[in-house]
Amino acid sequence: MPPLSRRQFVTRSVTTVAGSALIGRTSAAPMPPMADLSDSAPLIISTWPFGKPANESALACLKRGGSGLDAIEEGIRLTESDPTNPSVGLAGIPNSEGVVQLDACIMSGPGHRAGGVAALEGFAHPISVARRVMESTPHVLLVGEGARAFAAKNGFERGPKVSPGQKKAWKAWVQQQAEAKRKTDNHDTIAMVALLPDGNVFGGCSTSGRGYKLPGRVGDSPIIGSGLYVDNEVGAAGATGLGENVMRYCGSFLVVEFMRQGLHPQEACIETIRRIARLDPLGFDLAINFIALDKKGRYGAAGTGQGFEYSVTSERSSRVLQSPGLTAKNVGPVGGNVTK
Ligand code: GLY
């Protein structure tokens, strides 16, 4: 058996709270009222409980005088280094050939700059390679062998093509070759967005992608506008979940555009999921989740099904919160107004 994703350890139930959007209850703190979903900068939001230590590392970097990009990179590198994380970094679940292919991107509000790598093999920190693509090439995205050659030429830290534990799990998977295995819920991602005291916004995203994917498959995470989008006039958003269901809708871009229209980040995440569910033949059965933050320090998240846990860190506190979860039953007619 491959290592379970953290999500599989989490016990959840969904509870309706009078007068609010549906709120899931888990081991994480329940969602505070939406009016409380704000804090002062520096403010860092990321996906999943494993984002909390990453946020804290990013905050420590800022306190040492690091830039917004330094903070995003340092925070995400922590998650990429976690040997127990099966969905980010080289300990991630490999592709169907038994090789881990990593995807990442980074984006700076100032200058609207972006860089990414996709299907990168054998390097420990795709977020750092993505930053180098942004800062030292005229390009936004390098993939596969080109990304690998770029990382090698620039002396980035190397790593195994697959961890010993994941190789064993992959061999078992090859033996089974079961279609059900292909559908394993194993595509958690770290997306991180940050608002600095000077009002500038930054973001990053990193993942090993969908477990046992076809070689060369690229998900939403390194694609600007899908797994991450930063707009220095508005705010930033990031995604985790089944990349194919995010990238067909430019999910993070859509969240930011809803914020631009005036929605609170939480409403923007909810409305994005509702828009996607309205168009998609699968309805809400999409396994997609968003985080968002705006220039006012307001933040929020939402996911399909029972929602997901996300991490929020400021100088005041560092917490894991439960996002609202959206299903056909709990958001009313698809395409209707946001339920508050
Ligand atoms: N969201 C990660 C992936 O689907 O690759």
Image (tube, rainbow, N blue to C red):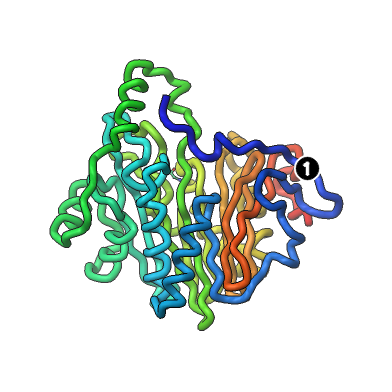
Q: Residue at x 33, y 35 (%)?
A: 94
Residue sitting at the far left: 153
Q: Residue at x 69, y 39 (%)?
A: 327
- Residue 28, given in percent of the width and then of the height, sits at 65, 49
Identify which residue is drawn at 19% across, 47% down. Answer: 145
Residue 47 visible to an observer of this rendering: yes
Residue 278 in view in this figure: no
Q: Residue at x 64, y 60 (%)?
A: 300
> Considering only vertical position in the picture, is 296 above or below 158?
below
Residue occupied by mark 1: 15
Q: Who is closer to the viewer here, 301 or 83?
A: 83
Measured as percent of width and height from the top left, residue 247 is found at: 46, 48
The image quadrant of residue 203 is bottom left
The quadrant the N terminus occupies is: top left
| Left or right: 230 in relation to 312 | left
Q: Write down which quadrant ligand 1 falls in.
A: top left
Residue 314, image quadrant: bottom right
